[in-house]
Amino acid sequence: MAPVPEQAPLSTPVPETITEASGIADSKRNPGHLWVQEDGGNPAQLYLLKHTGEIARTVYLKGAANRDWEDMALAGNHLYIADIGDNNREHTISTIYKFEEPPLTTDTVRQIQKIQFRYPDGPHDAEAFLVDPVTETIYLITKNNTSAQLFKVEQKGQNGQVQTAERVGSIDLKGVVSASLSDSGQGIILKTYKGLYYFKRNNHEPISKALQTTYTKLPYKFEPQGEAVCFSVNGKGYYTLSEKVLSGMVSLHFYTLLP
């Protein structure tokens, strides 16, 4: 049974500096903070945002490029940045950046692994992904298909070469723009522009199997161009954050999950 969220979120304004948030992750190493990435065309940097809305730090990723960053995941002790957006479906190779989650005192990350892949059937536009912290399998969720297509990429034994993703299913949703796996591994949220969808995962079954089950729609306060969702580290709720677009102010929303 899915957890029951409170209907109204706690909303906190964020600085105007953050205008194109496309991915967020609740920090393990820096309690009380969120990592925020911005969409393509912005610098290869992250914001460390306090839960109270203030920017605590800007962290640069040396050697990385922000072609079209679309989502973020924190799995184990590593952050993953997914450069997987491709509106025109013209890029044959996509990249996921992986690095150890930095402490609050860091201003530049220099040790970054690049995980590169291609799709077996040509380019796709994707804005959501998940990482299994146990197997390290990466699951990619396409955006613009009638039903979202699900692909997987393995990290282990790949030795840095460009690999071909494997199609492992489809999901009865369209327009998925963000995804999050709870720290317990038992809950998954997929986000579209219009809503949030919760999937229950049993006994660390493959994420691809969990996403084939029936979802529960969660209450959601509509955000213009809302492209980011993540569970809180303690599992007691989840955050959403949007791009600014035409709204006068962007707010960080937190929803409490009732036991």
Image (tube, grey):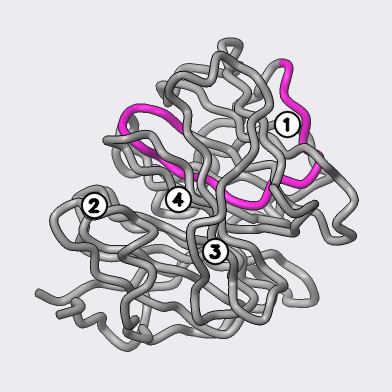
Of the two numbered discs 1 and 4 on the same chain, state the one appearing first in sequence. Answer: 1
Return the x and y of residue 38 as percentages of the image width and height: 69, 48
Residue 198 is drawn in which quadrant?
A: bottom left
Indicate which disc residue 185 carries. 2
Confirm or deny contact between disc 4 and disc 2 (CB under 8 A): no
- Which of the marked residues, 1 or 2, is nearer the chain's N terminus? 1
Vertical side of 241 occupied by 59: above or below: above
Residue 162 spot, x, y in % from top left: 68, 26
Contact? badges 1 and 3 (CB < 8 Å): no
Three-letter code for the amino acid on which mark 4 is drawn:
Leu
Spot occupied by residue 26 in the image (x, y as percentages of width and height): 38, 47
The quadrant of the image that shows the C terminus is bottom left
Please tell me which residue lies in front, 159 or 253.
159
According to the picture, the residue beneath numbered tag 3 turns out to be 241
Farthest-out residue, left: 259
Label annotation for residue 130: 4
Distance between the alpha carbons at the discs numbered 4 and 2? 11 Å
Q: Are marks 2 and 3 in contact (CB under 8 Å)?
A: no
Q: Secondary structure at mark 4?
A: strand
State which region is magenta.
63-79
The secondary element bearing badge 2 is classed as: loop
Q: At label 1, which amino acid type do we have?
A: Ala
Residue at x 25%, y 48% (from the top left corner): 183
Q: Earlier in the sequence, mark 4 or mark 2?
A: 4
Q: Mark 1 = which residue?
A: 44
Q: Between marks 1 and 4, how big is the CA–CA gap?
A: 21 Å
In this orientation, which residue lies closer to the viewer: 127 or 162?
Answer: 162
Q: Nearer the viewer, residue 208 or 234?
A: 208
Image depth: mark 3 or mark 4 in front: 4
Q: Under tag 1, what secondary structure?
A: loop
Q: In the visual, does 147 lie left or right of 35?
A: right
- Disc 3 marks which amino acid? Leu
